[in-house]
Image (cartoon, rainbow, N blue to C red):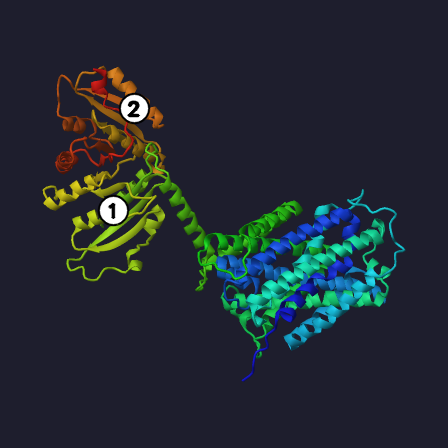
Amino acid sequence: MSVTKKFGTFAGVFTPSILTILGVIMYMRLGWVVGNAGLLGAIIIIVIAHVIAVTTGLSISSVATDKKIGAGGVYYVLSRSMGIPIGGSIGIALYVGTAFSIALYLIGFAESFNGYFGLGMRVNDFRITGSIALILLTALALKSTSAALKAQFFILAAILISLLSIFFGTKEFAPATVPLFASKGAVPLEVVFAIFFPAVTGFTAGIAMSGDLKDPKKSIPVGTLLAIGVGLVIYLGLAIFLAYTVNAETLKADTNILMKIALFAPAVVLGIWGATLSSALGGILGGPRILQAMSLDKVTPKLFGIGKGENNEPVNALLLVFIIAEAGILIGELDVIARVVSMFYLTAYGFINISYFLESWANPDFQPTFKIKRWIGLLGFIACFGVMFKLDMVAMLGALAVIGGLYLGLQRKEVHLQSNDVWRSVWENVVNKGLKKIDARIDENSNWNPNIILFSGESDHQHYLLELSKTVSGRTGIVTNFKLILDKNNDKPLRRTEQVVRNETFKELGIFARQLKVDNIYTGITNIATTFGFSGVEPNTIMMGWPKGLENSKEYAKMTETLLLLDYNLLYLDFDRKATFGAYKTVDLWWRETDSKNAEMMLNIARFIIASPKWNNTSIRVLFVNNNNVDSTIIHDKIASLVEDLRVNVQIEIINNAVEQKPFYDIIKERSATTDLTLLGIPNYKIEKQAEFILKTNDLFETIGSTLLVKAANNFNELDLDIIKSEQ
């Protein structure tokens, strides 16, 4: 049985990372960066780029030490933390960016190679040289990953020798003064930054090898951060050296200046070729492993998940990398490719950082062994998208649109794994903190925010009750519908997963739905009313349909008294099955002399009703029966003042009944006979009398169509509408 070869920190992470960092940009564009930006400008560019690299490196290292890391590097980490849709969309972006970066390195190699041997220096010449190099490197990667990684040690030695040769080279191009900032006619700093940024993206080359590491949790943080740190020191040192060694005009004009100032030019040539080829090789090794991991997770076609040999080498994925890289080589211009690569990497790095921030903030199960401050991830996220916005807002929006499209596509594909989804943790954390804030602040004078327990039952007209419950709860109210399954034995309750009900009706209306087994409907309702809810979002309203034919039931009477004692707002709908809600055009609110809480609650309900699309052209009337011969103007002004405060446009009608003394219900029958929905308040009697009133209201319901019986809880805002006594 063969043993799969695994690599340590130095060979598996640090070496491929540092060789990609010290690549084509360092040798062929760093002098150009210093020449155009000036010394301080170049240092600022290097530092900002490394802020992004360091924060991203820290974030990915922390996440990597929390979970088991498999093949796929950054993609694997993101998909197991933020979920497959976001991990897959960023993984695809990172994969394409990696493939294009191969073209960047090989075009840089072609520039140096052709220039050294006096070959053609046109774009087509670079394309030919780059394509040949790509074929040879792909063949090496196909032959042996181990051999490719071992070759990197020799390349690393060549780079170190070339750097020594540069630092001990000639000073004949030294400037009289060192420009600190960009001079007149220089390339804009945004363009300079975009071309430089791929220099710091190399640390992902090591992370991409995660599936081939002995101990990824240890190797990734150490190897990644060490490579970034060494790269920062070398870039800063070389930028300062070039500013004092070569004048700005020469730096801007000659991209091969390092060979001319070196103590031994062939050493620099070997360094350039080694760095560019090894960087390309790092992409050729890492890119296919990202695609292979995504294919194994069914994000991308299974074809690319197929591997060969004892190490499961991603041959099919490598061939696709070859095609994308060749497409980049055909662009032929290093600066253009660099800007494209920058956008892909900045987008991916931004989401890596926000992934860490959200994990550390929201996920209680996030326990990395490599701990960093949470704000580092947020800083990295802001830096990435701030730089993208500054570089090219259109390109940034385009990148976000592409990733958004990929995300939505993967969501629809419904790719699922047994992995964490940080978004669930985020929402749970937001809800948790919000509940604590709400629970800590008791405001007796706050507006009514409905949290309704609905008992709709199953009938032909259930939808209307569901519709009305959602209407009276407004945009922010909560409605939870309970279906009670009568089971006299009740020996096997439903499992928690079975209690959750999901169907299109509830989803469309935004109603939560549950089902429970009960041995008695009335005790089931009172038990739910007594126990359902938790601090911060306790239910405050019970809503149900009027139980036809049960008005004389003792159990129903007892349930009603219990609900009143529990101090709920009660909404009982007597639904007209023939007329339904008519044309959704008229609503009547009947107030009684002392019904102050009910009056306010009915106005709130009316406010929510007219905000609903079906009721948006509704005419609302407030009807008040004046039985005590009080001046109608006084009553009208009092009601108008309250109506104005609640911003409900209504018509106020005062019905003088002091002489005729008609029964209250007869007046309602007369005035609301054709109204689409009538709201009637329960008088503020003692609880026993209120329960009796509810049970005896059925005769009225039979004559006036759809009626909502309203009883406001005692803790509702106290508004003095008992105006009769105060004004007599």
Of residues 575 and 198, which is closer to you in this image? 198
The kind of residue tagged 2 is: Gln
Question: In percent of the image, x 78 and y 51: which residue is there?
Answer: 34
Q: Measuring from the top left, give residue 690's x and y in whole percent.
A: 16, 35
Q: Secondary structure at mark 2?
A: strand
Above or below, 291 against 240 in this view is: below
The kind of residue tagged 1 is: Gln
Of residues 26 and 340, which is closer to you in this image? 26
Which mark, residue 158?
Answer: none
Above or below, 568 against 50 in this view is: above
Q: Measuring from the top left, give residue 699's x and y in whole percent.
A: 12, 35
Can you identify the residue that label 1 sits on? Answer: 462
Can you identify the residue that label 2 sits on? Answer: 651
Q: Quadrant of the N terminus?
A: bottom right
The image quarter containing residue 556 is: top left
Of residues 634 and 233, which is closer to you in this image? 233
